[in-house]
Amino acid sequence: MLQIILPIVFLIFGIFLKKTNMEGFKGSKRFANMFIILGISTLVAKFILIYLKSK
């Protein structure tokens, strides 16, 4: 379950970094794409592993 929740948290945090205008997060905006890609790839890999395990 943690393997599905954590990538979703990465996706939400990456989108938050991309959209925010808060002063404290201006230096972290360059990491937004990294968090989004990490979240998507981890989530897809987990679904592939769940599918392969069910066979």
Image (tube, grey):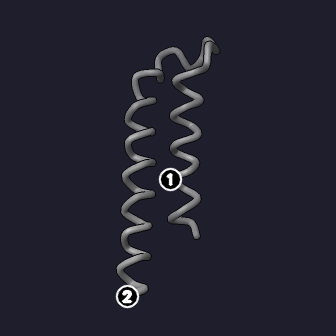
Note whether 12 is above or below 30 in the view shown: below
Compared across the picture, whether 32 is left or right of 6 comes to left
The quadrant holding residue 36 is: top left
Residue for point 52% across, 45% down: 10
Q: Position of residue 28 (x, y in %)?
A: 47, 23
Q: Residue furthest bottom?
A: 55
Q: Which mark is residue 49?
A: none
Q: Earlier in the sequence, mark 1 or mark 2?
A: 1
Local secondary structure at mark 2 = loop
Give the amino acid at mark 1: Pro
Label 1 belongs to which residue?
7
Q: Quadrant of the N terminus?
A: bottom right
Residue for point 58% across, 48% down: 9
Q: Position of residue 12 (x, y in %)?
A: 58, 40
Residue for point 64% across, 15% down: 22
Q: Position of residue 13 (x, y in %)?
A: 57, 37
Label 2 belongs to which residue?
55
The quadrant holding residue 32 is: top left
Labels 1, 2: front one: 2
